[in-house]
Amino acid sequence: MAGKTGFRLPPEPSGYMTVGHAMAFTINYLYKEQYDGELWLRFEDTNPRKVQQRYYESFRRGIAWLGIKCDHEKNVSDDMEAIYGSGKELIEQGNAYACSCDEAKVKRLRFDGTPCEHRDTPLEANLRVWEELLAKKHKEGSYVIRFKGDMQSPNYSLRDTNLFRIISQPHPLTGDRYTLWPTYDLANAVEDEMCGITHVLRSSEFRNELQQLLRDALRFRKLEVIQFSRFNFKGTPVSKRLLRPLVEKKVVSGWDDPRMPTVDGLRRRGIVPEAIREFTLQVGYTKTEHEYDWSLLLSLNRKLLDPVSKRLFFVPDPTPLEVDDAPKKEVDLSFHPQKDMGSRVIETAGEFFVSAGDLKGIPEGGVFRLMDLYNVQVTSAGPRPKGKYAGEELLANTRKFQWVTKEHQQIQVTVPGELFLEGDVYNDQSLKEVNGYAEAAVSALKVGDIVQFPRFGFCRYDSPGHFIMTG
RNA sequence: GCCCCGGUGGUGUAGCCCGGUCAAGCAUGUUACCCUCUCGAGGUAGCGACGCGAGUUCAAAUCUCGCCCGGGGCACCA
């Protein structure tokens, strides 16, 4: 790639940003960095019926969170005059015409491969209608501007596709200033030219041929187009069709529910941006159809989290444990087994809480160890377990359990799973709640902090008393 | 139906353009063990794949043809 390169992130602000966007954007960003190019964030907002203000913000937020830096930002809706210019040029060239056939007829003729009478409308008449369209003299649905392609082409998208249509609904950014809106192909061709885009890296659900014809007709530069197949996650379709009902019926807590494939959802779950970047790098981008398993992303995420996450004790399903002959102690426990991340001091006497499940595995007379503290011999199993102090020495083959004292905090941990089962069926087991006690030091955490609860997992502090398990 | 594009272990990929070094590498997963006062991280070992069939060739995951399977497109969406 010699010379100046240009890349773009072209979201349509018609929904929240998803992992799919994040990965596609990451690919573009990586290329831009490698070739020292310019990167555009360009909102493809040419359909006022779909676009909403809050979605622009979702993308800006998500992109910033990912650490992607764009050199420029713009909205296609800001460039309507330029796109109109190209539209008019196409008409003047005889490459586009105004058509007043109704939608059904256009479809039928396109299927049959026969042109309609408007195809041969004289230039002057086309230009007259064009000016009238700009002056908003026609009602929605009355006219479209079509590209003069090839009505016989085996590729149906070349059979005189629509370039402009009238949409009377106000646009969230431009209000009712424009009613004649370009469709995707023309808008993209013009914008890519204006932005100096040289490389288009995008997923494969976009057709390419028409845009190439338009670019040629308008004497635009050639583009390098690289396509990759869509990013699908097992059990978590990115499709709005499937996700929207879940939000509307309140089956999930919102678009940022930790089970959702949205960027907000991943962030809440405790996936870090670097993990998404590395994941994208590793799974690459191929034309092969694939269905990613969450385990790879989660594994990368754990490796990133491990060296930077404090260890704190969390006891799920807690049961009280009285320890006889327990010495009063004041222990200083470090937050991390290898890194120096500071420590906290805990005072212990003879009263603890440990996980009922852990204790179940120790018979009467058996010995286990309270992690980082001392050994305990079980003197009474059952519903009201008791034990007695059994020395400090670290014994081989002794189970070690995390514990808390009276000074603890009741918390709930949400454990997210896959949203859908085979065949797009909602998985009503996709969310589990685990209740338990966390040691007092959790009160010093801030929302967004990610810690590791040893023998449980990495968890993100979501709100007071509430954590979300990362995986 | 028509037009593109794909098919390597459970999952994701490398290799395919320029055939041999591929009895197929890496990661994830899983099993066992080591390490660790965690069921995390780290380490070692094992498990597991070239869609099918022909052809070309001394030699094919790699080239050719046919078949099968999957995805996308065929909007007054992007």
Image (spheres, coloured by chain):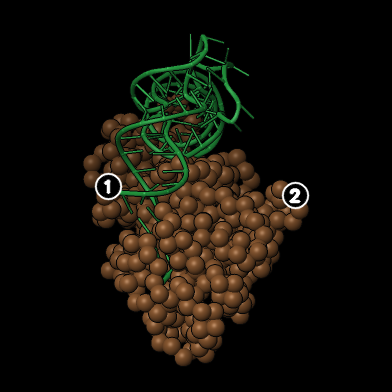
- Residue A189, relative to residue A81: is it above or below? above
Chain A: its colour in the image is: brown
Q: Amino acid at mark 1?
A: Glu
* Residue B19: % across, % down: 57, 21
Indicate the secondary structure of the residue bearing disc 2: loop
Q: Residues within 10 Å of mark 2 (few under 14, many from 20)?
A: few
Say what secondary structure mark 1 lies in: loop
Residue projecting furthest to the left:
A382
Is residue A282 something that shows in the picture? yes
Residue A230 horizontal/vertical position (percent): 45, 51
Look at the image and give the colour of chain B.
Answer: green
Is residue A120 left or right of A423 when viewed as pictured? right
Output the chain of dot 1. Answer: A
- The circle drawn on residue A422 is 1
Q: Residue at 40% of width from left, 75% of height from top?
A: A117
In front of the other: A32 or A121: A121
Give the residue at x 47% y 74%: A120
User: Does A397 appear above or below A313?
Assistant: above
Residue shown at 61% from the left, 77% from the top: A85
Task: Give me the residue at 48% from left, 44% from top.
Answer: A287
Residue A3 in percent (x, y) is at 76, 53
B13 or A343: nearer the viewer: B13
